Image (cartoon, helix red, strand yellow):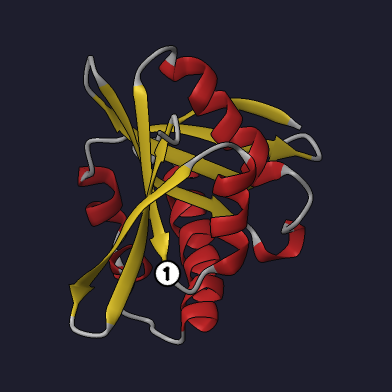
């Protein structure tokens, strides 16, 4: 697996990122029994308009198997999305991507949110040392769990 910087502005990579994002968030929508996850409904233009930095996980040469996107300030890194293709879940791709963002964050605080009922994602963040900061109902009936690193 090769982790490299990617951009949705690049063609055909933008379309590949969008397809990967939809496939990944479809799995989360099933897990949390709610398909109102905003990135699930983004267009390519919407995706490209996000002010995010991206890393992609390439396998088998040039296959995009996962990606992570974040925003950052001098004090904090906010992991905005972590997406892994359903065909390669539970193979360490998500973990490797998050660990790379953690390494790039240095001493800065890292925050991330996921669906409250997305048990696999929550377990990943907790195994990596993230601590639960709270749960928030972002729209009626749609709850997210907010995590921070370091945990305290």
Q: Quadrant of the C terminus?
A: top left
The vertical placement of 75 against 148, above or below, is above
Res 136 quadrant in image? bottom left
The vertical placement of 14 against 143, above or below, is above
Q: Give the image location of residue 95, x and y in percent.
A: 65, 40
Q: Residue at x 23, y 43 (%)?
A: 50
The vertical placement of 28 against 102, above or below, is below
Q: Which residue is mark 1?
A: 116
Q: Give the image location of residue 20, x and y in percent.
A: 53, 58
Q: Name the one closer to the observer, 112 or 54.
A: 112
Q: Name the one closer to the observer, 31 or 93.
A: 31
Q: Residue at x 64, y 37 (%)?
A: 57
79 relative position to 98: left or right:
left
Res 64 quadrant in image? top right
Q: Give the image location of residue 76, x and y in percent.
A: 28, 25
Q: Name the one closer to the observer, 112 or 61.
A: 112
Residue located farthest toward the front when viewing the structure as drawn: 152
Q: Residue at x 66, y 34 (%)?
A: 96
89 relative position to 69: left or right:
right
Q: Residue at x 26, y 85 (%)?
A: 141
């Amino acid at each position: 697996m090769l982790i490299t910087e990617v951009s949705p502005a690049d063609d055909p990579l933008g379309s590949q990122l969008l397809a990967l994002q939809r496939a990944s968030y479809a799995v989360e929508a099933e897990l949390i029994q709610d398909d109102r996850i905003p990135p699930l409904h983004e267009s390519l233009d919407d995706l490209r308009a996000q002010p995010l930095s991206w890393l992609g996980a390439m396998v088998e040469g040039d296959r995009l198997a996962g990606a992570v996107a974040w925003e950052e300030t001098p004090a904090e890194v906010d992991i905005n999305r972590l997406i892994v293709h359903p065909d390669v879940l539970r193979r360490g791709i998500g973990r490797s991507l998050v660990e790379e963002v953690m390494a790039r964050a240095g001493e800065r605080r890292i925050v991330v949110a996921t669906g409250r009922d997305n048990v696999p994602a929550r377990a990943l963040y907790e195994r990596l040392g993230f601590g639960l900061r709270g749960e928030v109902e972002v729209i009626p009936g749609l709850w997210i769990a907010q995590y921070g690193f370091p945990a305290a």
